[in-house]
Image (cartoon, rainbow, N blue to C red):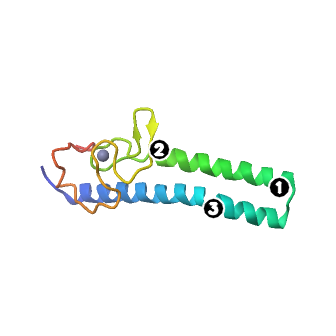
Amino acid sequence: MENNPIDSVVYARTLRQTRRRRKVFFATVLTYIPALYVVHSISPTTRAMGTFFAIWLVFLILATILVTVSKCPRCGNYFHVHGPTLLILRKCLHCQLHIASNELPGSLNGVVPYNK
Ligand SMILES: [Zn+2]
């Protein structure tokens, strides 16, 4: 199995993109309560709270879609989806690649990458 620099760049970029999308998702989830508190302290009306919730929900849906379509650089499958199930875990649901892995594409452990 050859290990050319282009594959390494694509591999690293795909894994970095998956990590970034996870961070955006968790940041969106974790900012809900603090942002709700801020909106409530500025304007405690039902309309303001409802508007905030609608905007936050749009961001949550977008973040969830981005996490869902994140690909694993090692096996090429969706990193967090196995069948109909979305599980945002730290390992790929197909090849068990860890999200914090620094491995290079040459160490594939017998898994054929999707771009070959
Ligand atoms: Zn994988």
Residue position for label 1: 48
Locate residue 109, reporting x and y percent. 16, 49
State the mark number for residue 31.
3
Is 88 situated left or right of 34 in this image? left
- 106 over 84 or under it: above or below: below
Kind of residue indicated by mark 1: Ala
**Horizontal side, residue 100 vs residue 19: left or right:** left
Label 2, residues with CA under 10 Å away: few <14, some 14-19, many ≥20 = many
Say left or right for 63 vs 105.
right
Name the secondary structure under disc 3.
Answer: loop
Looking at the figure, which quarter contains the C terminus?
top left
SS of the residue at dot 1? helix
User: Based on the displayed image, in which of its 4 quarters is residue 101 positioned?
Assistant: bottom left
Check contact, mark 2 vs mark 3: CB within 8 A: no
Q: What is the number of the mark on residue 68? A: 2
Q: Is residue 83 above or below residue 87?
A: above
The answer to whether the residues at label 1 and label 2 have Cβ atoms under 8 Å apart is: no
Determine whether label 1 and label 3 are within 8 Å by CB: no
